[in-house]
DNA sequence: TTGGGTGCAAATTGTTTGCAATTGT
DNA sequence: ACAATTGCAAACAATTTGCACCCAA
């Protein structure tokens, strides 16, 4: 069925943003969409590629992820703890909740908060361009 | 008058959290409170100390800022762009707005957003422990 | 064919650490 | 006196970059 990211669509995506369709780029795109997790670090992607027998340099992974970010194909997040994590930009905007015990990442959306943010920016004479909201949570006791 | 951070109060603050009152620590605390900006990187602090004739190592600045963070004296933020910025934890909780044109940092508070965050976490079976909200804005056109 | 893309190693950047010397209590 | 603290240099971790070679268009 309409698999959002089959080989063909992926090629289109790359061409659309002016990037040559190369093996590394295809494989990285593939890894991002078919890997279990939605949020991967550059290393995560690199290791998964190695595991699948691909011989793609870590530097290339970083370069490609950057290109994807500028192209709007992926979103880069800076959660606590060093590395950046990348996620395919497919299901519209959402924010994140990170469990500080398990590291699990949960996505959520809240129109009300989005609206308030815009209002606050306006109230200070600015236009909201971007924002980053991350909730650090722990499993409810009880 | 009751200057919130005179020499005496600073000494007390340090002792209170079990840190010896040393020259570097006093000077760093001083820089944080009297510098023009409220949000400084470790380098910012380091340079300002050098300018004032103090000979304090960058490593010490990092170490002390970390101790201050664990002690709850300063808060560390990870805005976009590599370095962490530190700010004295004095006027209660607030979030930040960063102008992407001038780099200016504006603080704000919004009880409604705070409440919604707690609700969202709860709704997912979690307790909100911490959060980071940064609005990236640009001066209103008009 | 040819300019963009890649791998590798070396370079950067931000931050932390080991250790001997120094200092606060 | 003695443990905590500092400075310096070296160590680290994440990411970027220079360059000779390679490959998609």
Image: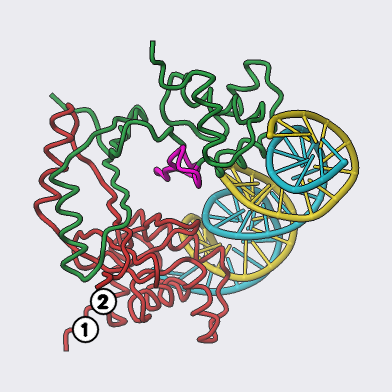
Chain colours: A green, B red, C cyan, D yellow
Give the residue at x 58% y 70%: B57
Question: What is the magenta range?
Answer: A69-85
Mark 2 or mark 1: name the one nearer the start of the chain: 1
Q: Which mark is residue B138?
A: none
Tag 2–tag 1 contact (CB < 8 Å): yes
Q: Chain of mark 2?
A: B
Indicate the position of residue B103 as horizontal and vertical percent values: 39, 69
Give the percent coordinates (x, y) of residue A68.
52, 40
> Spatial distance from mark 2 to mark 1, Cα to Cα?
9 Å
| Residue at image mark 2 | B9
- Residue B124, by quadrant, is top left
Nearer the viewer's eye, disc 2 or disc 1? Answer: 1
The residue carrying mark 1 is B3
- B119 over B76 or under it: above or below: above
Q: Badge 2 local density, few (<14 within 10 Å), some, or many (20+)? A: few
Q: Nearer the viewer, residue B60 or B34?
A: B34
Check disc 1 and report its element: helix, strand or loop: loop
Q: Residues within 10 Å of mark 1 (few under 14, many from 20)?
A: few
Q: Quadrant of residue B100?
A: bottom left
Outermost residue, top direction? A1
At x 46%, y 23%, the residue is: A33
Q: Position of residue B12 (x, y in %)?
A: 28, 71
Q: What secondary structure is found at the residue carrying circle 2?
A: helix
As drawn, is B44 to the left or to the right of D24? left
Judging depth in this view, the residue of C15 and A93 nearest the camera is A93
Could you tell me which chain the residue with mark 1 belongs to? B
């Amino acid at each position: 069925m309409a698999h959002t990211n089959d080989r063909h669509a992926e090629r289109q995506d790359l061409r659309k943003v002016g990037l040559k369709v190369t093996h590394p780029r295809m494989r990285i795109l593939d890894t991002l969409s078919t890997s279990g997790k939605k949020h991967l670090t550059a290393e995560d992607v690199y290791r998964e590629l190695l595991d699948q027998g691909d011989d793609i340099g870590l530097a290339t992974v970083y370069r490609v992820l950057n290109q994807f970010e500028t192209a709007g194909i992926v979103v880069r997040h800076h959660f606590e703890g060093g590395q950046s994590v990348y996620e395919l930009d497919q299901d519209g905007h959402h924010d994140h909740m990170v469990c500080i015990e398990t590291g699990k990442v949960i996505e959520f959306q809240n129109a009300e908060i989005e609206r308030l943010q815009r209002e606050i920016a306006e109230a200070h004479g600015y236009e909201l361009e971007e924002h980053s909201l991350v909730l650090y949570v722990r499993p409810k006791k009880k």
